[in-house]
Image: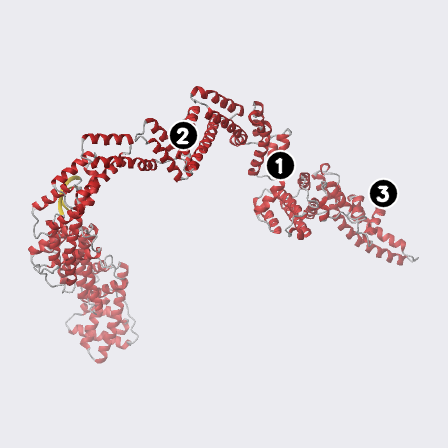
């Protein structure tokens, strides 16, 4: 049994020798180093090879410990000290036991040091042991085997986890020794992460460490602008790191790891994601090619798993799916075979299965196929159009074979009817656009016949294609010209075709249909087409009308003109404009310089209107332009009439208007302009009078006979407006009491609102109203008031301005009148109310506004009384009672209405309360008067008690001092009176007062003299006793002091 133990001991001696030798920590052969040059290899970096090289590169002592095994190492550590001591004892060259013992002790101490060193190396050997396991192959090792190494070698868990992370970094660094990106390396990294049971944070840390290694080794090349293998290694690192850290289930953890890696290389998040995905795309493309083009069995879930592993985003996957799907579709359809290319049922089935595998939507798959089949169908349509144009007759029977060929081609290519219809329209519109372009080129070189021929061919194609497809030409070709020709060419081409149709001055049904089709194809709006038509046909009709008007008017000529109008088929408005122009020319010849026509000329003009089929309304504008000056002159003559204007003048104006054929609107407009001009003269005089009135005394009475007064000038303005019929009566509908009624009102045909500033007109109205109130003559004043509404109409003042002036003047009158009425205790009685009501009715003031003015004046009256009392040093009970009485009379609350501050209220309360005490109205038995004061001055009961007690204390202290002063100078009678007043206060709140300036002797004298005086006045001892007891309390005398 001792043999194995001895063998273990001998083995550890070899371990100790290796540990303490100068070369004990050096590997027996060089380790594999990683350098940029090594990146040239394209062979996969296999994990077993990497970890075998790692084991071989470890120090010799760790390899020995690994080879011996963890159990033997643990047992050897237990006996190493004793064995070392025994060796020292045996090897010491001495026959003396003591010397041998010393040698044994020395070697035993050395063994203790070796034991500690070996224990540390044993723990470090755990990483070597794990690497040895991994060198067997990742698939041959389990996670439990790896985890057991920690316990076997006595390594704490945190330290073991760190060792595992470093082992992960070893393989990751080895992968980054080559720029070639292999998915097998990514698979082994992910498998290694699972075997080592590394957390997401540990993987992120090792990925960052690997990034730092890459940055350190390749920094010079990374900063260079030229492409290099180092930059490819960086791209590989980004791909591997992104795949590793993206497995972190924590969004915050992934963001942290990716951001610090991005900052290391100065990359944005977008650049990082783009480079990572660029590495994944080739692998996914190979996967798709195998599954779709090579026929390798795969499922949609498997493709999704590959995408997830490689980190291919959905938009990129959709693009790659569409690309490989297009490649497959091209191989099945074979578009290079032109007319022989088709989409068979088998090809369709295969494409449908592939679309399902790639999880492409029906729309996306159809779009890919359409990119191949639609050009093929367009080619078929182009051949059909060429054949259609060459046919001598393109009726339905002739078009049937062409239509059948297109239908068969649609079925061969698997296109829908809607899609084919769009392609047919596209091809046919393109061919028609070529014809239009040819016409435009011919037009530019002034080849009129060539341009017309091209248009005819284009219109013929439109008709034939519509017949072929069973569509209207409008649906196929509308607005075609907008994208082919310039706007000027469009208009010129249409005008050219129109003139060709108007050669015989008649547009028949066929020509109308032809022009309608051309308008639609060219995209001409109805207004633009009408302008072109008018420009072409208008001169023809104008020539016919001018020839007819130049001759005597007859029924035959009228019929000829009507036939020309029907043939040219001009829009009614255009034909009417041409006729009006001819009429205007004739009118100007009859009335040069606006001369009023004679009766015969008027009759001739009426006949001309009938001949041209014109209504009176159609020539109003021409007559207005010709006769405005003449009619304006007649209006001015009428308005210059002094005084009342006779009715026959107005009748004459009406007859003149009829002869001149002026519209009612025109006559009213001219009338308003002339009336306003005349009104402005009156208004100017009134404003001049207003300026003069501003310099007069405000209280000077107004003389209505003074022609320079504002009132006189304004009345002249209003009277002119009445005489000149600027103000006219009118019946309007209104609502009163919830029902509709009719009212007679006056309205103004024109106003001065546009002639003067609003400020001036407002002030003119205001001054007129002021003078109406100032006039002493009631009849004259009433005349002014009766013209207020008319003046507001003439001046053009809106209701809100009038209301504002009325409120201003009414408020001033109310305040002045109420101020006088409320002075010296006055009130508002029936007579005052009657006057105020008359002001309200005259000015139309709202009742609420009037009530507000009255209330404000009452409140102001009480406020003025109180303010005068405080400011005039006239604060006494009588004045206070006067203010309170006024407040009660006008229902004014001192706090709620006047907002008096509390100190003022309490001051007034104190004075009122002291007066009540001194006059005997406030006693212990009767406090009603005090309650009334509390209510009036808003003093609470508690606060009133405090104020009474404070006032009593103050008055009692002052009374005792004053009585003492009288005692000292011998004024006994005055002393007694003072004490009596003091006792009036003391009865409300009996209490001793502090009077340190009065001695006890003086207090006794006060008491004795007061008692003597009361007895001398005839009062009995019993009657005196209450007052004497109260005096003793107040001055603070004891019974022994008065005995």
**Would residue 153 appear left or right of 198 to someone viewing this image?**
right
Spatial CA distance of label 2 from label 1 is 58 Å
Q: Is residue 750 visible?
A: no
- Residue corresponding to mark 3: 4
- Earlier sequence position, callout 1 versus callout 3: 3
Query: Is 875 located above or below residue 197 in the figure?
Result: below
**Would residue 998 appear left or right of 608 to someone viewing this image?**
right
Q: Tell me the quarter of the image containing the C terminus.
A: bottom left
Query: Is 661 located above or below residue 504 in the figure?
Result: below
Mark 2 lies on a secondary structure that is helix
- Earlier sequence position, callout 2 versus callout 3: 3
Q: Position of residue 355 (x, y in %)?
A: 56, 29
- Residue corresponding to mark 2: 456
Mark 1 lies on a secondary structure that is helix
Residue located 27% across and 77% down the image:
1001
Q: Position of residue 975 (x, y in %)?
A: 20, 75
**Would residue 84 appear left or right of 54 to someone viewing this image?**
right
Q: Tell me the quarter of the image containing the N terminus.
A: top right
Residue reaching furthest to the top: 397
- Residue corresponding to mark 1: 284
Query: Is 446 located above or below residue 79 in the figure?
Result: above
Q: Quadrant of residue 619?
A: top left
């Amino acid at each position: 049994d001792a043999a194995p133990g001895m063998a273990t001991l001998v083995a550890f001696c070899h371990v100790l020798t290796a540990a303490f030798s100068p070369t004990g920590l050096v590997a027996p052969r060089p380790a594999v180093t990683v350098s940029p040059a090594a990146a040239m290899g394209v062979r996969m970096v296999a994990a077993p090879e990497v970890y075998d090289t790692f084991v071989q590169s470890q120090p010799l002592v760790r390899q020995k410990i690994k080879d011996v095994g963890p159990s033997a190492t643990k047992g050897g550590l237990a006996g190493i000290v004793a064995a070392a001591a025994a060796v020292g004892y045996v090897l010491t060259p001495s026959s003396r036991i003591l010397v041998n013992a010393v040698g044994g002790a020395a070697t035993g101490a050395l063994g203790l040091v070796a034991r500690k060193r070996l224990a540390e190396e044993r723990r470090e050997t755990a990483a070597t042991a794990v690497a040895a396991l991994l060198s067997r192959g990742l698939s041959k090792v389990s996670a439990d085997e790896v985890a057991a190494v920690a316990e076997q070698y006595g390594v704490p868990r945190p330290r073991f986890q760190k060792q595992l992370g470093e082992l992960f970094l070893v393989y990751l660094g080895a992968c980054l020794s080559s720029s070639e990106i292999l998915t097998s390396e990514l698979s082994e990294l992910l498998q290694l992460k699972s075997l080592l049971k590394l957390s997401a944070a540990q993987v992120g840390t090792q990925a960052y460490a690997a990034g730092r290694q890459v940055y350190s080794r390749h920094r010079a090349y990374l900063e260079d602008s030229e492409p290099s293998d180092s930059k490819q290694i960086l791209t590989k690192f980004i791909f591997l790191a992104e795949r590793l850290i993206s497995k972190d289930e924590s969004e915050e953890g992934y963001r942290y790891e990716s951001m610090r890696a991005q900052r290391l290389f100065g990359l944005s998040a977008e650049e990082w994601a783009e480079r990572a995905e660029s590495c994944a795309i080739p692998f996914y493309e190979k996967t798709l090619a195998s599954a779709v083009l090579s026929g390798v069995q795969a499922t949609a879930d498997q493709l999704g798993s590959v995408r997830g592993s490689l980190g291919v985003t959905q938009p990129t996957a959709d693009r790659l799916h569409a690309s490989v799907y297009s490649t497959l579709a091209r191989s099945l359809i074979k578009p290079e075979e032109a007319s022989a290319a088709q989409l068979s049922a088998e090809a369709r089935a295969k494409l449908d299965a592939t679309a399902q595998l790639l999880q492409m939507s029906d729309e996306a798959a159809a779009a890919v196929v359409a990119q191949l089949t639609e050009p093929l169908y367009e080619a078929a349509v182009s051949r059909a159009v060429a054949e259609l144009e060459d046919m001598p007759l393109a009726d339905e029977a002739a078009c049937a074979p062409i239509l059948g060929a297109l239908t068969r081609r649609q079925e061969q290519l698997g296109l829908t009817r809607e899609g084919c219809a769009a392609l047919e329209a596209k091809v046919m519109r393109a061919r028609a656009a070529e014809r239009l372009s040819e016409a435009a080129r011919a037009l530019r070189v002034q080849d009129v016949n060539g341009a017309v021929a091209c248009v005819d061919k284009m219109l013929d194609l439109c008709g034939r294609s519509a017949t072929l497809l069973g569509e209207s030409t409008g649906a196929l070709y509308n607005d075609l010209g907008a994208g082919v020709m310039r706007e000027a060419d469009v208009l010129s081409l249409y005008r050219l075709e129109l003139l060709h149709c108007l050669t015989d001055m008649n547009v028949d049904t066929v020509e109308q249909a032809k022009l309608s089709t051309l308008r639609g194809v060219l995209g001409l709006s109805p207004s633009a087409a009408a302008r072109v038509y008018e420009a072409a046909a208008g001169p023809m009709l104008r020539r016919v009308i001018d020839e007819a008007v130049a001759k005597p008017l007859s029924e035959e000529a009228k019929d000829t003109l009507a036939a020309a109008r029907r043939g040219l088929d001009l829009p009614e408005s255009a034909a009417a404009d041409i006729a009006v122009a001819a009429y205007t020319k004739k009118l100007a010849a009859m009335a040069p310089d606006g001369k009023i026509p004679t009766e015969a000329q008027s009759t001739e003009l009426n006949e001309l209107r009938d001949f041209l089929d014109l209504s009176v309304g159609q020539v109003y504008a021409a007559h207005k332009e010709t006769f405005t000056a003449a009619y304006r002159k007649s209006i001015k003559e009428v308005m210059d009439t002094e005084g009342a204007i006779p009715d026959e003048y107005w009748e004459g104006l009406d007859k003149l208007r009829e002869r001149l054929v002026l519209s009612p609107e025109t006559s009213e407009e001219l009338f308003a302009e002339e009336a306003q001009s005349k009104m402005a003269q009156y208004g100017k005089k009134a404003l001049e009078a207003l300026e003069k009135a501003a310099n007069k005394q405000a209280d000077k009475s107004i003389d209505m006979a003074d022609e320079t007064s504002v009132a006189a000038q304004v009345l002249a303005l209003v009277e002119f407006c009445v005489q000149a019929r600027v103000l006219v009566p009118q019946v309007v509908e209104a609502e009163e009491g919830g029902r509709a009624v009719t009212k007679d009102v006056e309205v103004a045909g024109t106003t001065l609102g546009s002639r003067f500033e609003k400020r001036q007109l407002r002030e003119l109205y205001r001054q007129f109203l002021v003078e109406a109130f100032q006039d002493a003559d009631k009849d004259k004043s009433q005349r002014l008031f009766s013209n207020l509404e008319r003046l507001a109409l003439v001046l053009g003042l809106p209701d809100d301005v009038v209301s504002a002036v009325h409120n201003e003047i009414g408020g001033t009158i109310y305040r002045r009148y109420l101020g006088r009425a409320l002075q010296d205790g006055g009130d508002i009685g029936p007579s005052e109310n009657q006057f105020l009501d008359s002001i309200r009715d005259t000015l139309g003031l709202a009742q609420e506004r009037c009530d507000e003015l009255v209330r404000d004046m009452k409140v102001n009256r009480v406020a003025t009384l109180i303010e005068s009392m405080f400011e005039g040093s006239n604060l006494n009970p009588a004045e206070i009672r006067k203010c309170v009485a006024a407040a009660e009379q006008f229902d004014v609350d001192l706090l709620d209405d006047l907002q008096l501050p509390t100190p003022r209220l309490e001051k007034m309360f104190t004075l009122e309360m002291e007066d009540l005490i001194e006059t005997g109205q406030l006693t212990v038995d009767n406090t009603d008067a005090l309650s009334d004061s509390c209510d009036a001055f808003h003093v609470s009961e508690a606060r009133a008690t405090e104020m009474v007690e404070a006032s009593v204390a103050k008055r009692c202290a002052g009374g005792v001092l004053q009585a003492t002063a009288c005692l000292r100078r011998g004024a006994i009678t005055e002393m007694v009176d003072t004490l009596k007043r003091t006792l009036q206060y003391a009865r409300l709140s009996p209490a001793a007062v502090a009077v340190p300036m009065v001695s006890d002797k003086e207090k006794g004298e006060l008491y004795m003299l007061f008692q003597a005086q009361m007895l001398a006045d005839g009062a009995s001892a019993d009657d005196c006793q209450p007052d004497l007891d109260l005096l003793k309390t107040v001055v603070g005398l004891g019974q022994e002091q008065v005995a």
